[in-house]
Amino acid sequence: MNYPDIPILNQRFGAPGRIAFRTGEAGLPIISLVNAYGTCELSLYGGQVLSYRPTGHVPVLFTSKAAVYEPGKPIRGGIPICWPWFGPSSDKAQPLHGFARLMQWGLQATEYSSDVTEVRLALSDSELTRHFWPYAFDLTLRVWLDQRLNLALTTVNRDKRPFTLTQAFHPYFRVRQITDTTVRGLDQALYTDLLTGQTGVQQGALNIRSETDRVYLPTSPECVLQDTGIGRAIAVAFTGTRRLVVWNPWIDKAHAMPDFGDDEYQRMLCIEPANTAEDAVMLEPGARHTLSVALQASLT
Ligand code: TA6
């Protein structure tokens, strides 16, 4: 894969001390956003936030030490973009969670002010994307850093036919120890356990003590990851969907994933605003939809 020229990107889109481009793992072009509130790095490959560190905090996101950075493979960690389908495709030959995280995204714009540093990436249909999904589209990812880390994924149907998409932000949150971690704000939320197919109602805070893969219907569009190990809370607020997936692979699945350390299940938890099949988005030609998520860390 031929990557854009880093010096040219810095010349055209960089801003000293605020926005910079560098060559990362395996030659991937990396964008860093900086301001008084923190730092964030994204990969143009996959349009994927790889790290986020608010000022005065330890990193908020987890990336596996065994992650691979190879074209055509997903990067295990940060905030993968699952689009235009979430989960496995009906066609088993298709990649899990769609193809957007396997594509080289284009740089649309960068901006900054005293309080905000922003980058906008774009992905449109191409011969390659049409190999996976036969529709014309424009996809824009807007990432801006202020007191929070904010992401907004906007899909525009550029086709002559309607299409239906499922999608998600799939953030891997870093935790000190999964057994010292709870998710608050899901109390009384209906959920479907994807491991058993059973449904239930969340009673109080969610503790993770085994493999967990649940789709929640929260009563409000936010939840809080409470990490008593670090002494921190991460508020997760979202729009554009009513569903939230919570996932931890636990021991067996961790052993089964080659790009994930056997014990790394102890140091991560995924909380994913998702348009799952129950909340799929049907777009008429010319219509658009935005899925957004905002992360805010606070010491506790
Ligand atoms: O997080 C929900 C989920 O669909 C899980 O069922 C598991 O398959 C996970 O995503 C895999 O995510 P990955 O980043 O490995 O593609």
Image (cartoon, rainbow, N blue to C red):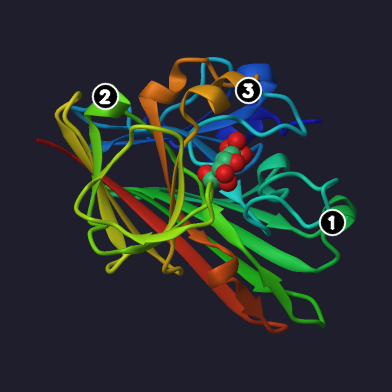
Q: Can you identify the residue that label 2 sits on? A: 58
- Residue 62: x, y in percent? 42, 28
- The answer to which of 298 and 275 lies nearer the viewer is 275
Left or right of 26, for residue 30: left
Quick check: 141 above or below 1?
A: below
Q: Amino acid at mark 1?
A: Ser
Q: Vertical placement of 300 versus 206: above or below?
A: above
For the residues labelled 1 and 3, say whether their Cβ atoms are less than 8 Å apart: no
Say which element carries label 3. helix
**Mark 1 element type:** loop
Image spot of residue 282 (x, y percent)? 64, 78
**Ligand 1 in which quarter:** top right
The quadrant of the picture occupied by the C terminus is top left
How many C-alpha atoms fall within 10 Å of the one at disc 2: few (<14), some, or many (≥20)? some
Picture layout, residue 2 above or below residue 193: above
> Which residue is labeled 3 in the image?
256
At a point 59% along the width and 71% down the height, the residue shown is 280
Mark closer to the chain start, 1 or 3: 1
Comparing 9 with 160, the one in front is 160
Residue 45 visible somewhere in the drawing: yes
Q: Secondary structure at mark 2?
A: loop
Which disc number belongs to residue 126?
1
